[in-house]
Amino acid sequence: MSGEDRGSGQVRRVRVEALAPEMVLGPREARHLYVLRLSPGAEVLVFDGQGAQAQATVVELDAARAILHLGESIGAAAETPQPLTLAVALLKGDKLADVVRAATELGVARVQLLVTRRADAREIGAQKLSRLNRIAEEASKQSRRAVTPPVLNPVTLADFQWEGQLFVAQPGSSLRLTQHLDWSAPVTVLTGPEGGLTTEEVNQLTAKGALSVTLGPRILRAETAPVALLGAIAAQGQ
């Protein structure tokens, strides 16, 4: 077996802190390789979450540790022309996990959590934030991205800052995101909680230069709206 997942025909992807001639993996990643019954000499693909990836060879492996030797560098799939940020209100249950997974697959560079007037929560625990970042890492592996977007601690809408263009999903708007999208600068899309952003919140953002855009004729759920916006961007092939 040459580094391929059994039955999948795909080379195993491994996230590392940095590409180096010799890379030592801790228990979490090592166990994944161990349960696949990889052995010394197996090939894997390593990526650093920042866009670099390369082939690597397993030289030592047990359930607690793995040692990999770096091989040939591999070109990563293209990212968006400028960084794409998703700013999303805190949601309850596993909704944020679903949003983070889809956003990673659709090419965001980061996910900024927001505290809004009608947000389902006012804060997020360290354990849940860590889980969301693990979900982003797994989604980057699954989607074969060399970039893993960080999920950032929530900030209030008043403290939220952005570069370039900001598009705010707002029912009733007549503007279409794809008609105003400009990749000469970073792009951010922002979606609210169940119940949406208040008119005052939207006005505060548009006063700072944001554009409110339509999501179509239907009212979408809070976990669907960000996927709809990001999907519209991804469909352009950017």
Image: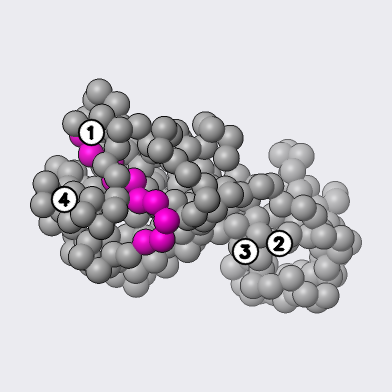
Q: CA distance from mark 4 to mark 1?
A: 13 Å
Q: Is residue 219 left or right of residue 133?
A: left
Q: CA distance from mark 4 to mark 3?
A: 35 Å
- Tell me the SS state at disc 3: loop
Whichever of callouts 4 and 1 sits on the residue coming sooner in the sequence is 1
Residue 98 lies, with reference to residue 185, above or below; the image says: above
Residue at position x 21%, y 54% in the image = 207
Residue at position x 66%, y 59% in the image = 51
Magenta segment? 162-171
- Tell me the SS state at disc 4: helix
Q: Amino acid at mark 1?
A: Ser
Residue highlighted by disc 4? 203
Q: Is residue 206 left or right of residue 98?
A: left
- Tell me the SS state at disc 2: loop
Find residue 59 and report its image quarter.
Answer: bottom right
Which is more foreground, mark 4 or mark 3? 4
Which is more foreground, mark 2 or mark 1? 1
Residue highlighted by disc 2? 52
Q: CA distance from mark 3 to mark 1?
A: 36 Å
Which is more foreground, mark 3 or mark 1? 1
Are circles 3 and 2 on residues that touch, CB within 8 Å? yes
Q: CA distance from mark 3 to mark 2?
A: 6 Å
Whichever of callouts 3 and 1 sits on the residue coming sooner in the sequence is 3
Find residue 126 and report its image quarter.
Answer: bottom left
Is any atom of residue 118 visible in this view?
no
